[in-house]
Amino acid sequence: MTDNELKKIADKISKLLALATSDNPTEAETAQRQANALMTKYNLTSGDAAAAQVHGKASDLHSKHRPPVYLSALASIIGKAFGCEAINASGGGYWKTEIIFLGVGIKPELASYTFDVLRRRIIKDRAAYTQSLSKRMKRENKSRKADVFCDAWLSRIHRQVGEFAGTEHEKAAIDAYKEQQWGDDLKKDERKSREAKRDDIDALIAGANAANDVSINKPVQSKRGALLT
């Protein structure tokens, strides 16, 4: 069975399972019976059917190292905005580091494209801010202030994200896909941002101001039209 055939069957099973929760007892029973028949015929579980609807779209970070905390945070914000989940696929050796957006429909493509656009912007803004700092400042202090700048930048972007943009069904499908693909091997990025110090207020203000004109929706409008076309 090809992946495309499996997806069609999985879509049908998922729709039947959704109908199986109907308030109409007859409709619910019929849908559940048909879903069970298809799962038996193709040796699939409800988890398999859910996972088959999910796919990933990768964004190349052009590095073989683990992404900095601020890029991981940006990926998480973008994933949430599009009802996706952002997975860090760290590279090394011959492998490049990627952020993989898992989701349903065109959402992973929209999330990946938006992340790529905003990733370039935050890297550019961070570099410009760092360049503006005194040359006599210690490298460690410059790095901390740049991180604080990025935290403020991201906080401004995060305000644009409403409630989870996906459905509970999609979230369950993504969870099933992750379990199927990685099981217990998938680790979350538990790193935290650096704490700001009292004299970092300038970095906080600069980061928030730099992101004033940044919108999650701007990259999406053109990309959505291209994808739908």
Image (spheres, rainbow, N blue to C red):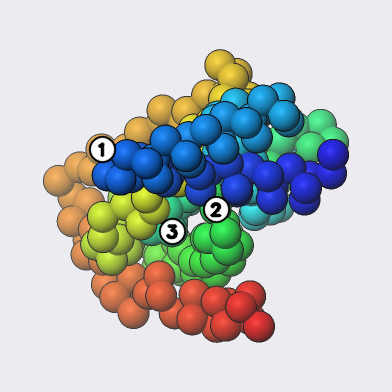
Disc on res. 151? none
Which of pointers 2 and 3 lies earlier in the amino acid sequence? 3
Q: Which mark is residue 82?
A: 3
Q: Is residue 97 above or below residue 155?
A: above
* Residue at image location 69% in from the left, 50% down from the top: 8
- In-front residue for pair 59/123: 59
| Secondary structure category for the residue under label 3 | loop
Q: Which residue is most to the top? A: 184
Cα distance between the residues tagged 2 and 3? 10 Å
Regarding mark 1 in the picture, which secondary structure is present there?
Answer: loop
Residue designated by label 1: 195
Residue at the limit of the structure toward the front, as seen here: 26
Using the numbered discs, state the Cα–Cα distance from disc 3 to disc 1 in whole angstroms: 28 Å
Residues packed near mark 3 inside 10 Å, few (<14), some (14 to 19) or many (20 plus): many
Q: Residues within 10 Å of mark 2 (few under 14, many from 20)?
A: many
Tell me if residue 81 comes above or below residue 93 in the rendering. Answer: below
The residue beneath circle 2 is: 104
Residue 103 in view here: yes
Q: Earlier in the sequence, mark 3 or mark 1?
A: 3
Residues at circles 2 and 3 in contact by the CB criterion of under 8 Å? no
Measuring from the top left, give residue 53's x and y in whole percent: 60, 46
